Image: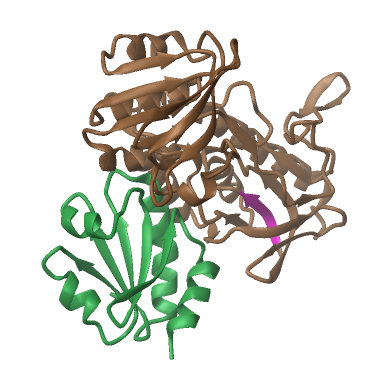
């Protein structure tokens, strides 16, 4: 499985200190559009396997990280490279948009 | 070459998929990025028959999708770039590829309208939202505004009332067009207040919403109103921008062309293009229910079946 689950406790090790770029999906079970995003994420995760990590953060269970990054709407997708956020996308994103952003950060 | 390509994956598109694949047609659903349609933005659906305790909108759509996938319909999880109905086979362009098909069912639905006022694009996701179900969580003990007067505005307000400190509905008229049942629930919720005859003219705040500008439509007086979040529920616009060569009405909805034969109804879901049929909110601005969209999708697929038998049998 190319997607990893991250929490307030593991965010630093899984995202901030990751060797490769990470896309964090801020989501919750009660959010329909977050479910829309899933099949698209699965497809891009496969395409960029080993190059970009897909991390899912449940905002309900991990409010600290969501608050830290000022999340006020979900789904929000944030792309991290070298520990810093390089792109924030609000709302459901298409495969093309994500692939385009990934290509910019993949060496 | 597909027999049927279905554009859209709300109740209309998915129901059409069930009927199409069960009739033996090679079927592709171009589900779009925002698959599942408007029900993905709802909570409890109590008016779809068969669910004793009701069902969550997103769950209903996920179940429908799984059912359609199990029956063997192919899915494309991207938005199409253009649908060209000017010649047969019809051509649907998606991900840079052209998909050819003998027939099409358009079930692209309708999307939420935005206010299109200064500050809106910058503050989307920073306090401006069209989905209270998704975002109410971030407005616990905060002040919120809902704009609109229909059923969806009522639902947004009721969802917000569960967590927010205050909910103020701003409406352009002096009465709601929402159903009696929804209005009753809103008026009996003490957290919800209503400002009548007012329009939102601008957003305030740079990195997040701090307030809105309101204009009184009777007196013309303008004022500023402090709020942490603004939820827009002012209606929908049909998704017909990318359809080429099909007749639309003045508001952009697909025009239906009922075709009779010997005085009897033959095709109820036909459009101006033979072989292109329509279902759901992209042509229906009257009923707009999950169950009617499903029914329209079913009719479109049955019409396609009849049309294919008469027009494409040899191939």
Residue closest to the eye, B177 or B261? B177
Q: Nearer the viewer, residue A45 or B209?
A: B209
* Image quarter hosting the C terminus of chain B: bottom right
Task: Report the residue that reaches farthest toward the bottom.
Answer: A107
| Image spot of residue B57 (x, y percent) | 38, 36
Q: Quadrant of residue A24?
A: bottom left
Q: Is residue A62 magenta?
A: no
Relative to A48, is B214 on the left or the right?
Answer: right
Q: Quadrant of residue B89?
A: bottom right
Give the camera-side residue of B42 and B187: B187
Q: Main secondary structure of the magenta part?
A: strand
Is residue B3 a member of the stretch shown in magenta?
yes
Residue drawn at x 40%, y 77% is: A46
Question: Which residue is located at x 43 percent, y 82 percent?
Answer: A105
Chain painted in green in the figure: A
- The spot of residue B299 in percent (x, y) is 65, 33
Magenta-drawn segment: B2-7
Q: Is residue B281 visible?
A: no
Tell me, by letter, which chain the rendering colours brown: B
Q: Foreground: B291 or B26?
A: B291
Query: Residue drawn 44% across and 49% down?
Result: B65
Q: Establish if B251 lies above or below B29.
A: above
Q: State the scheme by which the image is colored.
A: by chain
């Amino acid at each position: 499985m190319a997607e990893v689950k991250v929490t307030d406790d593991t965010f630093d090790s899984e995202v901030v200190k990751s060797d490769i770029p990470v896309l964090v999906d801020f989501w919750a079970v009660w959010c329909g559009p977050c479910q829309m995003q899933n099949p698209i994420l699965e497809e891009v995760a496969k395409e960029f396997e080993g190059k970009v990590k897909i991390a899912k953060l449940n905002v309900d269970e991990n409010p600290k990280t969501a608050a830290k990054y000022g999340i006020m709407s979900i789904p929000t997708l944030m792309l991290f490279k070298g520990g810093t956020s390089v792109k924030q996308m609000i709302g459901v994103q298409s495969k093309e948009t994500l692939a385009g952003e990934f290509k910019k950060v993949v060496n | 070459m597909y027999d049927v390509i279905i554009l859209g994956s709300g109740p209309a598109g998915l129901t059409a998929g069930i009927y199409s694949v069960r009739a033996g047609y090679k079927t592709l659903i171009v589900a779009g990025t925002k698959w599942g349609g408007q029900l993905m933005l709802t909570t409890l659906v109590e008016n779809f028959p068969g669910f004793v305790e009701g069902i969550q909108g997103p769950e209903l759509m996920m179940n429908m999708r799984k059912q359609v996938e199990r029956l063997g319909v192919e899915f494309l999880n991207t938005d199409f770039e253009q649908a060209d109905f000017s010649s047969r086979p019809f051509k649907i362009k998606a991900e840079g590829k052209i998909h050819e098909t003998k027939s099409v069912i358009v079930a692209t639905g309708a999307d939420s309208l935005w206010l299109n006022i200064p500050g809106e694009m910058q503050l989307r996701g920073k306090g401006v939202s069209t989905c209270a179900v998704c975002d109410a969580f971030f407005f616990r003990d905060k002040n919120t505004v809902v704009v609109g007067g229909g059923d969806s505005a009522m639902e947004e307000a009721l969802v917000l009332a569960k967590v927010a400190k205050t909910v103020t509905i701003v409406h352009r008229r002096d009465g709601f067009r929402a159903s009696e049942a929804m209005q009753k629930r809103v008026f009996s919720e003490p957290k919800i207040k209503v400002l009548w005859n007012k329009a939102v003219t601008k957003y305030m705040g740079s990195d997040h919403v701090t307030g809105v500008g309101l204009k009184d439509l009777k007196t013309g007086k303008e004022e500023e109103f402090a709020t942490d979040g603004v939820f827009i529920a002012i209606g929908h616009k049909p998704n017909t921008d990318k359809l080429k060569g099909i007749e639309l009405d003045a508001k952009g909805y697909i025009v239906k062309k009922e075709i009779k034969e010997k005085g009897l109804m033959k095709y109820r879901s036909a459009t101006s293009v033979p072989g292109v049929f329509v279902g759901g909110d992209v042509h229906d601005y009257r009923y707009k229910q999950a169950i009617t969209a499903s029914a329209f999708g079913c009719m479109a697929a049955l019409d396609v079946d009849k049309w294919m038998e008469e027009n494409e049998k040899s191939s």
